[in-house]
Amino acid sequence: MRSFAVVAAVLLAGCGQNAHRAANESNLAASAPAAAANSSTPAANVASAASNAIGALPPADNPLRFVGVWATSEANCTTKPWRFTENKLTATDGPKCSIYKVTKAPGGFDLAATCPGKKPVETDLIRLRFAESARAMLVESNAISPTGLIYCGKES
């Protein structure tokens, strides 16, 4: 009988701890939304910061995902950047193009542009395709040899 009393006491103590733990978990769950709302780094800011990191592609839902600074390597982000805006591509020791039409295409964008480095100046179609697994953007056109670029960040 004494062993039954000891077992019963242990089980009751365990039940009390589980009830206390459940109450604490319930309180934590209820306070989580408030803590998230008061956080100094909301998820949107974290995602934005991550998309601005060298080597991380901008978010796929960005309407002009190609806009920013790109380069053939991380070292070239500062020395030989390719700067894309909505209407211009300027690359150090590379192409300089005026973009006059942006079209969403499967896997990226098609940019109708003129690149004056080519003689005579003609319109060109710059094809931008995102290689998600390689975290790179591939650039190709009549005036630009196929080139892989990594994202260096937003224009400063």
Image (cartoon, rainbow, N blue to C red):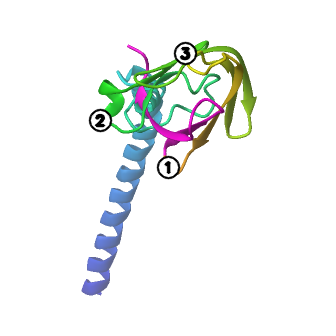
For marks 3 and 2, give the CA distance. 21 Å
Q: What residue is at 42 percent from the left and 16 percent from the top? A: 155
The type of residue carrying mark 2 is Ala
Proximity of marks 1 and 2: CB atoms separated by less than 8 Å: no
- Going from N to C along the chain, the mark reached first, 1 or 2, is 2
Q: Secondary structure at mark 3?
A: loop
Q: Which residues are magenta?
A: 135-156
Residue closer to the observer: 97 or 119 = 119
What residue would you read off at disc 1? Answer: 134
Q: Residues within 10 Å of mark 1 (few under 14, many from 20)?
A: few
Q: Which residue is mark 3?
A: 85
The residue singled out by tag 2 in the image is: 75
Q: Secondary structure at mark 1?
A: loop
Find residue 141 and report its image quarter.
top right
Query: In what element is the residue under mark 2?
Result: loop
Q: Is residue 147 left or right of residue 75?
A: right
Q: Is residue 107 above or below residue 155?
A: below
113 w.r.t. 129: above or below: above
Point out the image quarter for the C terminus: top left
Rendering coords of residue 117 (x, y %): 55, 19
Of the two numbered discs 3 and 2 on the same chain, state the one appearing first in sequence: 2
How far apart are the alpha carbons under marks 1 and 2?
17 Å
Which amino acid type is shown beneath numbered disc 3?
Answer: Thr
Give percent across and percent down for residue 11. Answer: 35, 71
In the foreground, 56 or 35: 56
